[in-house]
C-alpha cells in the first residue's frame, strides 16, 4: 500500500523529464531553423534589404565576385578600383535580364554545390543541390534560360583526369535538364557515341534556343552548336573551349589550347561564326576562364586573382580592371 505513491512520484518525474526533453529539443530545432534561415538570408536577403539590385549603377557597370569576401560586388565605370560588395556569397556568378545565377560550394565530402536562382534584387527564388565543384555559370540574355557546369571529378581542364556535369534550366517552364550529355551529337558529319563525352561552358543565343558549348571526347575538344527545341548538337570546330557569344551573336570568344604545357596551355581567341576564321587577342597569358563580353568589342575575364579586360579584335593590350575579383559580367 505504501509503494503506490512512490511509483506515482517516479512516474510523474519521468513524465516531467520527458516533457522537458521534448521542449529542449523543440527549442533546439527552432534555434537551428532560425540559424538556417539566417544563413540563407545572408546569401540573398542582405542585398535586397540594402536595395542592391541588377538595375543599380551606371550603364556598363561591372558586376563580379569579390574574392576577398566571396560576395557579389559592383564597380562603376566612373570609379575604377572602387566597389560595392553587398551581394550574396557565390563561387561562380552570372546575370542577365531579370535573373542572376549563383553557384556555391558546400562543405564536406564528396563535393557538392548549391545552385541559387536570384531575381533582379538578388533575392533567392529557387535553390537546388547537385554533386561536384562549381565551375561555369551562364544566364541567357532574356534571363529565362540558365546553364551551369560542375566538376564531377577533378578540378582542372589542364589534365585529362576530369569529368563534368552541365545542366540547363528553363525558367519559363521550370524544366530542368540535369545533364546534357545525352543530347544527340553529330561529329564530323556522323552521329557520335562514346562513353567519355563531356560538355561544359554553355553560352546562349538571343532566341533562348540555340546555344554553344564545348564537348570533349577521345582526347579532343570541339565547339558545338546546340538546339534545345530539336534536342540536337553538332560540332563546328576543333580546339575550342568555354565559348562566349558576343552581344550581336556574330562572334565567339574562347580559350584555345596552344601548348602542351599543363601550366599554361591556353590563349584567348575570337572566332567569326560566319567564316569560322579566328584570331588571338592581345592577351598572351594562359587564361582559364569563360570570358564575358562587356561591350560590343571588349572582353573581361578572370586571371591570377583579378579581372582583366582586352579588346576583342586583337589590338591593344590587356589591362587589370579590378583586383581580388572573378566572374565578371555586365548585365543587360
Image (cartoon, rainbow, N blue to C red):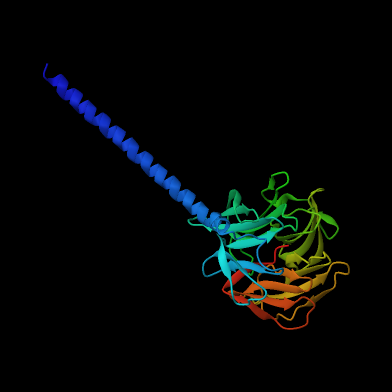
Query: In the shown orientation, is residue 175 left or right of residue 4?
Result: right
Residue at coordinates 66% horizontally, 67% vertically from top-left? 57
Q: Is residue 112 visible?
A: no
Residue at coordinates 42% horizontally, 47% vertically from top-left? 32
Count of numbered labels shown in the rendering: 0
Q: Nearer the viewer, residue 142 or 316?
A: 142
Quadrant where the C terminus lies?
A: bottom right
Up-down relation of residue 158 to residue 281 (above or below): above
Quadrant where the N terminus lies?
A: top left
Residue 166, picture quadrant: bottom right
Up-down relation of residue 279 to residue 250 (above or below): below
Residue at coordinates 70% horizontally, 63% vertically from top-left? 331
Place of residue 195 in the rendered image (x, y in percent of width and height, measured from the top left): 69, 54
Q: Nearer the viewer, residue 299 or 57?
A: 57
**Residue most toward the left?**
2
Place of residue 105 in the rendered image (x, y in percent of width and height, measured from the top left): 54, 58
Query: In the shown orientation, is residue 290 left or right of residue 45?
Result: right
Place of residue 293 in the rendered image (x, y in percent of width and height, measured from the top left): 74, 69
Query: In the shown orientation, is residue 86 left or right of residue 285?
Result: left
Q: Nearer the viewer, residue 150 or 5?
A: 5
Q: Is residue 155 visible?
A: yes
**Residue most toward the top?**
1
Up-down relation of residue 108 to residue 79 (above or below): above
Place of residue 239 in the rendered image (x, y in percent of width and height, measured from the top left): 76, 69
Residue 47, picture quadrant: bottom right
Up-down relation of residue 243 to residue 113 (above or below): below
**Residue most toward the right?**
275
Residue 138, picture quadrant: bottom right
Amino acid at each position: 500500500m505504501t509503494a503506490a505513491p512512490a511509483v506515482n512520484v517516479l512516474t510523474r518525474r519521468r513524465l516531467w523529464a520527458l516533457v522537458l526533453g521534448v521542449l529542449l529539443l523543440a527549442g533546439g530545432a527552432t534555434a537551428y531553423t532560425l540559424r538556417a534561415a539566417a544563413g540563407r538570408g545572408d546569401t540573398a536577403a542582405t542585398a535586397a534589404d540594402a536595395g542592391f539590385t541588377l538595375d543599380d549603377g551606371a550603364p556598363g557597370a561591372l558586376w563580379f565576385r569579390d574574392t576577398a569576401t566571396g560576395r557579389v560586388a559592383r564597380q562603376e565605370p566612373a570609379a575604377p578600383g572602387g566597389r560595392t560588395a553587398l551581394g550574396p556569397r557565390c563561387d561562380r556568378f552570372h546575370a542577365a535580364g531579370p535573373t542572376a545565377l549563383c553557384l556555391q560550394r558546400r562543405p564536406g565530402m564528396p563535393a557538392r554545390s548549391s545552385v541559387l536562382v536570384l531575381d533582379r534584387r538578388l533575392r533567392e527564388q529557387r535553390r537546388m543541390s547537385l554533386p561536384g565543384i562549381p565551375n561555369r555559370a551562364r544566364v541567357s540574355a532574356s534571363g529565362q534560360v540558365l546553364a551551369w557546369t560542375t566538376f564531377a571529378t577533378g578540378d582542372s581542364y589542364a589534365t585529362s583526369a576530369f569529368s563534368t556535369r552541365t545542366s540547363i534550366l528553363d525558367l519559363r517552364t521550370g524544366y530542368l535538364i540535369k545533364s546534357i550529355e545525352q543530347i544527340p551529337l553529330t561529329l564530323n558529319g556522323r552521329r557520335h557515341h562514346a562513353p567519355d563525352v563531356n560538355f561544359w561552358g554553355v553560352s546562349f543565343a538571343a532566341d533562348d534556343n540555340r546555344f554553344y558549348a564545348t564537348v570533349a571526347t577521345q582526347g579532343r575538344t570541339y565547339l558545338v552548336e546546340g538546339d534545345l527545341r530539336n534536342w540536337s548538337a553538332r560540332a563546328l570546330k576543333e580546339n575550342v573551349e568555354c565559348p562566349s557569344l558576343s552581344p550581336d551573336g556574330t562572334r565567339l570568344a574562347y580559350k584555345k589550347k596552344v601548348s602542351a604545357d599543363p601550366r599554361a596551355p591556353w590563349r584567348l581567341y575570337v572566332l567569326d561564326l560566319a567564316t569560322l576564321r579566328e584570331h588571338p587577342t592581345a592577351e598572351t597569358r594562359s587564361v582559364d576562364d569563360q570570358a564575358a563580353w562587356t561591350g560590343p568589342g571588349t572582353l573581361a575575364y578572370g586571371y591570377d586573382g583579378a579581372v582583366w579586360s582586352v579588346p576583342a579584335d586583337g589590338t591593344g593590350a590587356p589591362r587589370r580592371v579590378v583586383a581580388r575579383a572573378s566572374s565578371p559580367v555586365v548585365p543587360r
